[in-house]
Amino acid sequence: MARGLDAPRKVIDRVLAVLCVVIFTVLVLIVGWQVFSRQVLPTPASWTEETARYVFVVLAMFGSALVFSERGHIAVELLATRFPLGVQRAMAVAVELTVVFFAVFVLIYGGLRATRNAWGQNISTMPLSVGQIYAVLPVAGVLITYFAICHLVGILAGEKEAVPQIDEANQGI
């Protein structure tokens, strides 16, 4: 079953990675235009600051889902690696269940409520409503829930390590 969930996860990962690159490129272009219009043009673009803020929030939500899929989120594994494998598995299952709880109740349920409440609230500098921007919350929640279930099934099936190994060659810093 874990392998059956892994194939769609990889496709979603690729789509999310491309989406994050596109959103980041848009963010860089917006901020670049903001700097150019402030420093070079006689009248700065009024829409860039608010637009950049919302684009950054969308990027953060999709980026966090992608990082969670790759099990690259922040983890304190110093203590976890000292326990026997059974305890490590129990801790990993507890972590994944906690993530599912958070994603379902905060991101999906809370995000849907926030989206509904703010759907009619227009953004003066953009042709979108605040609710349309908030819609990224339940979408990211669904993705994170799916990824957590994939991890949970993999851990319980013994196909994934309870404590992910750090790839020192793949560290950004």
Image (cartoon, grey):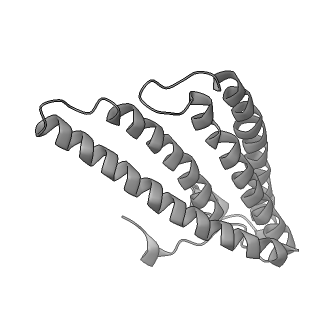
The structure residue drawn at horizontal position 75% and vertical position 76%, both measured from the top left corner, is: 7
Is 116 drawn above or below residue 89 in the view shown?
Answer: above
81 with respect to 60 (left or right): right
Viewer-closest of 79 and 131: 131
Question: From the viewer's perspective, is 105 left or right of 130?
Answer: right
Where residue 77 sits, quadrant-wise, is bottom right
The percent position of residue 32, horizontal first and vertical second, equals: 25, 48
The picture quadrant where one finds residue 3 is bottom right
Residue occupying the far front of the picture: 127
The answer to which quarter of the image holds residue 158 is bottom right
Q: Is residue 141 visible?
A: yes
Disc tally is 0
Pinpoint residue 13: horizontal percent, then vertical percent: 62, 67
List x then y, in percent, for residue 111.
69, 34
Q: Quadrant of the C terminus?
A: bottom left
Quadrant occupied by the N terminus: bottom right
Q: Residue at x 20, y 41 (%)?
A: 35
The x and y percentages for residue 110 are 72, 31
The one nearer the camera, 82 or 5, is 5
- Residue displayed at 70% across by 42% down: 138
Residue nearest the viewer, comparing 10 with 134: 134
Kindly tell me whether residue 77 is visible in this rendering: no
Residue farthest toward the right in the current orientation of the protein:
1
Q: Give the answer, above or below, for where 52 lies relative to 116.
A: below
From this view, report whether residue 107 is shown above or below residue 27.
Answer: above
Camera-side residue: 92 or 45?
45
The residue at 76%/52% (across/down) is 145
As displayed, is residue 145 above or below residue 85? above
